[in-house]
């Protein structure tokens, strides 16, 4: 199975930057992290970032393209590390384990990821033109489809992957934990039960 790169430089290394451009980028990202720590990701706007960093709004847009691009850049290191683990890391998350075991491990790791980075991931997806076309979302949905096929499921694995991916949506998971009071471990157990039933047909 081949994958397209999903984040700029996530697995192949970022292109070289001039030292002044790199410094400006880090200054902007540092200001963005400060604002998120103070007010949360929902309050981070391009205007507020430009004001905090002491640059023009156009500079922010030239660097990141959009608010979604800014959010994805802030997430890039953690998302790239997650991708590397499920694409190339050791089993059961990485190659070498049966498809069902990898599928269970993928869901457990994604739930843990959302518990740590969920507010930022949610903001990145909601800022995009289409949350379903965020490259990271597209990639791990394709990965779920691949694992379903690997596990022997041939009853429309594409549609089933879309349905399973929806259960790992950051909004859904954060609501379950923060509003409904469910423990993350319970979400992981439910994912294991769900995908096992889907793959085994019972």
Image (cartoon, grey):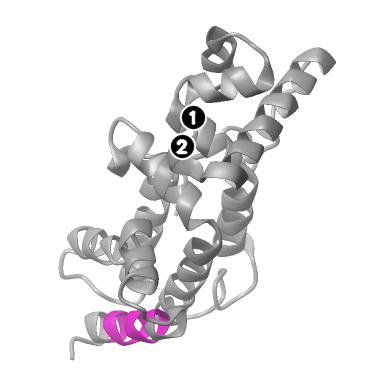
**Residue 85, quarter of the rendered image:** bottom right
Closer to the camera, 105 or 52?
A: 52
Relative vertical location of residue 139 with respect to residue 177 in this rendering, above or below: above
Rendering coords of residue 15 (x, y %): 70, 24
- Residue at left offset 30%, top offset 79%: 195
Q: Is residue 155 left or right of residue 59?
A: left
Find out whether residue 145 is within the magenta segment: no
Quarter that holds the C terminus: bottom left
Instruction: Tell me if mark 2 has few (under 14), some (14-19) or many (20+) residues whose alpha carbon lies within 10 angstroms of its own.
Output: few
Instruction: Say what secondary structure mark 2 lies in.
Output: helix
Mark on residue 178? none
- Looking at the image, residue 188 sits to the left or right of residue 34; the answer is left
Left or right: 29 in relation to 184: right
Residue at 33 percent of width and 84 percent of height: 190
> On the image, numbered disc 1 is attached to which residue?
69
What residue does disc 2 label? 43
For the residues labelled 2 and 1, the Cα–Cα distance comes to 16 Å
Please give the name of the residue rendered at 38% of the width and 58% of the height, measured from the top-left corner. Answer: 170
Q: Nearer the viewer, mark 2 or mark 1?
A: 2
| Residue drawn at x 35%, y 77% as measured from the top left | 151
Q: Residue 175, can we see it? A: yes
Vertically, is 179 above or below 194?
Answer: above
Q: Magenta part of the protein: which range? A: 187-196
Task: Depth check: give the residue in front, 201 or 173.
Answer: 173
- Which numbered disc, 2 or 1, marks the residue that appears first in the sequence? 2
* Chief secondary structure of the magenta portion: helix
* Residue furthest bottom as drawn: 202
Q: Position of residue 54 (x, y in %)?
A: 68, 15
Residue 192 shown in magenta: yes
């Amino acid at each position: 199975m081949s994958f397209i790169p999903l984040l700029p430089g996530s697995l192949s290394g970022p292109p070289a930057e001039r030292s002044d451009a790199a410094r400006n980028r880090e200054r902007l990202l540092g200001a963005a992290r400060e604002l998120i720590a103070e007010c949360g990701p929902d309050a981070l706007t391009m205007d507020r970032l430009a004001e905090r960093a002491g640059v023009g709004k156009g500079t922010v847009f030239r660097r990141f393209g959009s608010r979604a691009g800014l959010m994805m850049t802030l997430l890039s290191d953690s998302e790239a590390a997650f991708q590397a683990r499920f694409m190339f890391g050791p089993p059961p998350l990485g190659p070498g384990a049966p498809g069902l075991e990898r599928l269970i491990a993928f869901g457990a790791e994604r739930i843990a990821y959302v518990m740590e980075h969920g507010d930022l991931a949610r903001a990145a997806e909601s800022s995009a033109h289409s949350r379903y076309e965020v490259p990271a979302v597209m990639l791990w949905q394709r990965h779920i489809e691949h694992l379903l096929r690997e596990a022997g499921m041939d009853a429309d694995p594409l549609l089933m992957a879309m349905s399973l991916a929806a259960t790992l949506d950051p909004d859904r998971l954060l609501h379950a934990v923060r509003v409904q009071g469910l423990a993350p471990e319970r979400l992981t157990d439910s994912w294991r039960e769900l995908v096992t039933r889907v793959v085994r047909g019972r």
